[in-house]
Image (cartoon, helix red, strand yellow):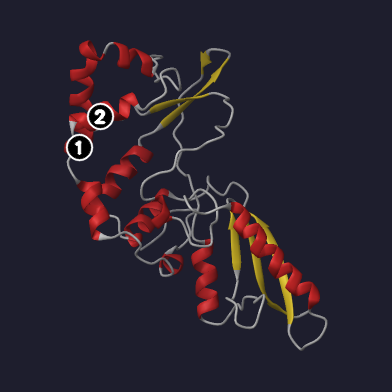
Amino acid sequence: MTQPPGVGDSSYILNGIGVSISSEINTILQSTYSVDEIKKALKGMGPTKAPGYDGFPVLFFQKYWHIVGKDVEDFCLGVLNEGKDFDSINRTNIVLIPKTPNPTSLDFIGQCIDSAQSAFVPGRLISDNVLIAYEILHTLRQKHSGKKGFMAVKLDMSKAYDRVEWSYLKNVMLKMGFAESWVNLVMKCISTVSYTVNINGNKGRHFYPTRGLRQGLSALIRQAVGVGTLRGVKASRKGPEISHLLFADDCLLFGEATKE
């Protein structure tokens, strides 16, 4: 199939991504949404955080739910259960806000994030990868003899979360095992969004993004290790072979190397 201009062939990367989503998870994700879930989601939102495009904060809907609740429920359930369009409300005002110190974890994110990634997943600490990286580097410093050379390379993926094609994102989710109906709902949320930059209270013109998120590097490295193109480094003879560690959008590569 002919790729659009500027879009690379992702089939090789997709071959390295395995199924990580079970049928049980898909059953949960595809179950019919209820009124109680809409109410629970609303109650869990910050009352004065990120007002909608119309300027109404969440507090308005929480306080006057007895008046507007039925309309909101019908609209949300129509989108979630019946596939209705929501382009008209999927608009975002871009303003500068401080980063949140305690991001909320998501239910099934652990199955989606690569095992080499140490951040953003309950039970994993970014300090774990720091310790492993230190051990590998210590091992490399102690090697003064032998025929094999080794290398450590730090990659900083510029705009790592802004440069993936949406078609690739869809293919990755399908390859991981997400049900197509759920993937289509997620893609609709992504592809219908529009943005307006808010400067000193004045809204600029609408613009529509075409990209966001980039994944696949870890899969490519695993493929290279699998076919022997790249060899990792061991901190001990019986220890695991470490080829790469992920730190959010930074990556450390370890491997055998020669001067050439």
Task: Residue at 45%, 21% (x, y): give it.
Answer: 49
Q: Quadrant of the C terminus?
A: bottom right
Q: As drawn, is 56 to the left or to the right of 180?
A: right
Evaluate whether residue 88 shows in this view.
no
Q: Which residue is mark 1?
A: 33
Task: Indicate the quadrant where residue 127 lies.
Answer: bottom right
**Residue that appears at 38% across and 67% down:** 18
Q: Is residue 138 left or right of residue 180?
A: right
Q: Position of residue 133 (x, y in %)?
A: 67, 63
Q: Is residue 132 left or right of residue 102?
A: right
How crowded pointer 1 is (Cα within 10 Å; few <14, some 14-19, many 20+) is rated as: some
First-in-chain label (1 vs 2): 1
In the rendered view, would you say 255 is above or below 5?
A: below
Query: What amino acid type is highlighted by mark number 1?
Result: Tyr
Res 68 seen here: yes
In the image, residue 230 above or below residue 137:
below
Residue at screen point 21% across, 47% down: 30
Identify the residue position indicated by label 2 in the image: 38
Indicate whether 32 appears above or below 56.
Answer: below
- Which residue occupies the foreground of this view, 228 or 138? 138
* Element at label 1: loop
What's under tag 2, amino acid-wise?
Ile
Res 252 quadrant in image: bottom right
Residue 86, given in percent of the width and then of the height, sits at 28, 30
> What is the distance, in whole Å, between disc 1 and disc 2 at their CAs?
8 Å
Disc 1 to disc 2: CB gap under 8 Å = yes
Spot occupied by residue 220 in the image (x, y as percentages of width and height): 52, 68
Disc 2 is placed on an element classified as helix
Per the rendering, the mark at residue 125 is none
Image quarter where the N terminus lies is bottom left
Residue 229 point in image, percent of width and height: 58, 80
